[in-house]
Image (cartoon, helix red, strand yellow):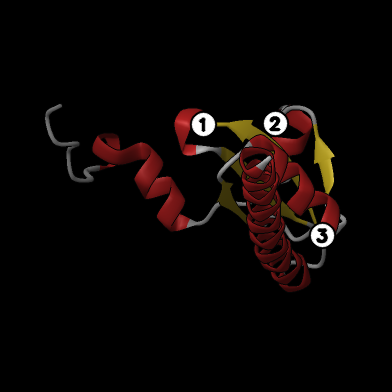
Amino acid sequence: MGDTADTAAAVGAADKKQDRTAAKLAKQIGAFAKQHGGAEGQLAHIGQAGTRIVLVGTDGGWGDLVAPTFAVAQLAAEKAGLTLHEEFDGEFAARVRTGPYEWSRMAGIQLGGSENPAA
């Protein structure tokens, strides 16, 4: 009997931790949306690291957050009222506005930026 109670308590604690993590992420999503006039997002698995929550603001600003699991990412998006896209397709990606920093980082060596260190 003790093992069952211990297991139930561990599951309950894990659920509470996931809910707290999702609430924290939802708060960050809400702050991003407020700063950028609203936001939409897309969830992308990034392996063992978890799930990336890509955010695109109404003004074209963008950012991302990482959740430990896909379920936590979905819960965070739901709590924040974030509209999710299935894919980061052309129409959604076209909303992203990049600045000089992003262009210099993306272009890297072609624009005279520093080379990537050898792997």
Q: Is residue 97 visible?
A: yes
* Mark 1–mark 3 CB contact (< 8 Å): no
> What's the residue type where badge 2 is placed?
Phe
> Looking at the picture, how far across and down is residue 14, in whole percent?
63, 50
Q: Report the Cα–Cα distance between label 2 and label 1.
A: 14 Å
Point out the tag, 2 or 3, that comes first from the N-terminus.
3
Q: Which residue is mark 3?
A: 80
- The local secondary structure at tag 2 comes to loop
- Residue closest to the eye, 42 or 107: 42
Q: Is residue 94 visible?
A: no
Q: Which residue is mark 1?
A: 46
Mark 2 vs mark 3, foreground winner is 3
Point out the tag, 2 or 1, that comes first from the N-terminus.
1
- Residue closest to the eye, 81 or 8: 8
At a point 82% along the width and 60% down the height, the residue shown is 80
Q: How many marks?
A: 3
